[in-house]
Image: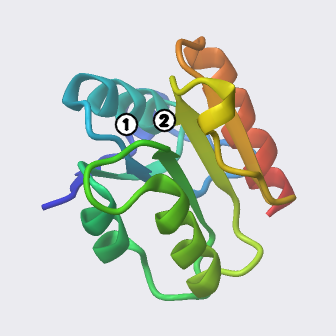
Amino acid sequence: MPALWPDMMRRWQPGWEPAHPILVVLVEDDPLVRDLFAEMLAEHGHHVVACRDGDEGLAALPDSGERVMLLTDVALPGRSGRALADEFHRRHPGQPVLFATGLPGDRLPPLRKDEALLRKPFLISEMLATVDRLAAAA
């Protein structure tokens, strides 16, 4: 079952709104990494649905028409991050995908113009800035 992270920033700073809030479907198989990313994204003002694998991520995708972003690991059990991203683009054309991976460069999927890649390890500030940039362009 995906975990829906509350919008924590609104509780701590009433009246604060991010410039481009977006629903982030986060797919990461490492529970510690998933929880950290979800908490930081929520604190930054985004709504987050955190999923443990590609199948759960696919089931968590909202109906088309919503502003949504997929943030996924590339190497996942079962459905790969690339396969998940392809289905995401089919359902949500023009919406962004952010891949986060520790894989070596020769094992990375080719990127589309509405996709970006962060190599683990990276700073949380890099992730948040990339999410904001992609959300602003969506």
Residue at 82% x, 52% y is 136
For the residue pair 46 and 74, the one nearer the viewer reads as 74
Are circles 1 and 2 on residues that touch, CB within 8 Å? yes
Q: Which residue lies furthest to the front in this view?
A: 106
Residue at 71% x, 81% y is 93
Percent from the top left, x then y, of residue 88?
A: 55, 73
Label 2 crowd (10 A; few <14 / some 14-19 / many >=20): many
Q: In this view, does 122 lie above or below 11?
A: above
Snapshot colouring: rainbow
In the image, taking residue 56 as reference, residue 79 lies left or right, namely right
In the image, taking residue 128 as reference, residue 13 lies left or right, namely left
Residue, disc 2: 41
For the residue pair 138 and 85, the one nearer the viewer reads as 85
Asked whether the viewer can see residue 21, the reply is yes
What whole-number distance in Å separates the C-alpha atoms at marks 1 and 2? 5 Å
Q: What element carries label 1?
A: helix
Percent from the top left, x then y, of residue 45?
A: 53, 41
Q: In this view, does 104 lie above or below 79?
A: above
Label 1 crowd (10 A; few <14 / some 14-19 / many >=20): many
How many marks on residues?
Answer: 2
Asked whether the viewer can see residue 128, the reply is no
Percent from the top left, x then y, of residue 118?
A: 65, 29
Percent from the top left, x then y, of residue 131?
A: 67, 41
Residue, disc 1: 38
Q: In this view, does 52 lie above or below 58?
A: above
The N terminus lies in quadrant: bottom left
Residue at 63% x, 44% y is 17
In the image, taking residue 130 as reference, residue 52 lies left or right, namely left
Q: What element carries label 2?
A: helix
In the image, taking residue 138 as reference, residue 84 lies left or right, namely left
Q: Which amino acid does label 1 sit on?
A: Ala
Residue at 66% x, 42% y is 18
